[in-house]
Image (cartoon, rainbow, N blue to C red):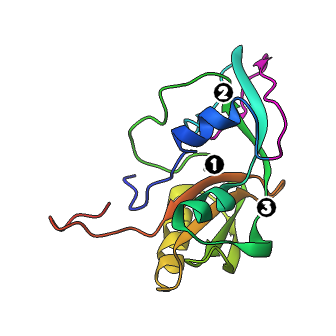
């Protein structure tokens, strides 16, 4: 399925910083993932067995707000995310949403241009995970106040990826 929305990995500048010191001020401690399966936010895929990864504390809304020149106030939060311990190739091209599997639940949190929560929704991905996420993003961005949406794991609340309001280019396409 081709998706309308772009799932954004953690930006490379942030990854470089997180690989030294995370958003909680802790030193990065890489390790070898013997089993694989950790959801990597640098390349938006599950880790493979034997890959070197790190679990770091990440504040996605704080970093977004800083780039926008705003302050999310009390809505700022940080939490654990897995990343490759060294630079990777980033996400592969292709359709679908990362970490979308039939039968799991995700949370879609909506934020305005100040970084304040406008609402959220628990998504039961059912048998059409990409379709459920697409419809939830359509619904979110139908509200002109919504600037971005964070998709999170419902069971742990961990940040999975960010989707920003799509823009229409002068050529008529979406970006």
Q: Position of residue 65 (x, y in %)?
A: 61, 65
Q: Main secondary structure of the magenta part?
A: loop
- Residues under numbered marks 3 and 2 in contact, where contact means CB atoms less than 8 Å apart: no
Give the magenta-colored segment's residue range: 24-41
Q: Position of residue 142 (x, y in %)?
A: 46, 83
Residue pointed to by mark 1? 101
Quadrant of residue 175 in the image?
Answer: bottom left
Residue pointed to by mark 3? 77
Side of 75 relative to 9 (left or right): right
Q: Secondary structure at mark 3?
A: loop
Residue pointed to by mark 2? 47
Q: Residue at x 51, y 74 (%)?
A: 147
Q: Position of residue 110 (x, y in %)?
A: 62, 74
Looking at the image, is 90 positioned above or below residue 6? above
Residue situated furthest front in the rendering: 69
How many neighbours does mark 3 have within 10 angstroms: few (below 14), some (14-19), or many (20 or more)? Answer: some
How many neighbours does mark 2 have within 10 angstroms: few (below 14), some (14-19), or many (20 or more)? Answer: many
Task: Measure the alpha-carbon separation of dots 3 and 2.
Answer: 25 Å
Q: Tell which tag, 1 or 2, sits nearer the viewer.
A: 2
């Amino acid at each position: 399925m081709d998706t309308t929305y772009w799932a954004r990995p953690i930006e490379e500048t942030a990854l470089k910083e997180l690989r030294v010191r995370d958003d909680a001020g802790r030193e990065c401690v890489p390790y070898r993932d013997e089993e694989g399966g950790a959801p990597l936010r640098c390349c938006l895929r599950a880790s493979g067995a034997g890959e070197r990864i790190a679990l770091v504390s990440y504040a996605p809304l704080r970093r977004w707000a800083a780039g926008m020149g705003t302050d999310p106030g009390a809505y700022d939060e940080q939490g654990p995310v897995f990343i490759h311990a060294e630079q990777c190739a980033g996400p592969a091209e292709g359709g679908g949403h990362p970490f979308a599997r039939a039968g799991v639940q995700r949370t879609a949190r909506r934020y305005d241009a100040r970084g304040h929560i406008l609402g959220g929704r628990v998504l039961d991905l059912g048998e059409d995970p990409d379709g459920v996420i697409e419809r939830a993003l359509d619904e979110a961005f139908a509200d002109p106040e919504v600037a971005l949406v964070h998709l999170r794991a419902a069971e742990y609340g961990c940040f999975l990826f960010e989707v920003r309001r799509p823009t229409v280019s002068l050529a008529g396409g979406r970006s």
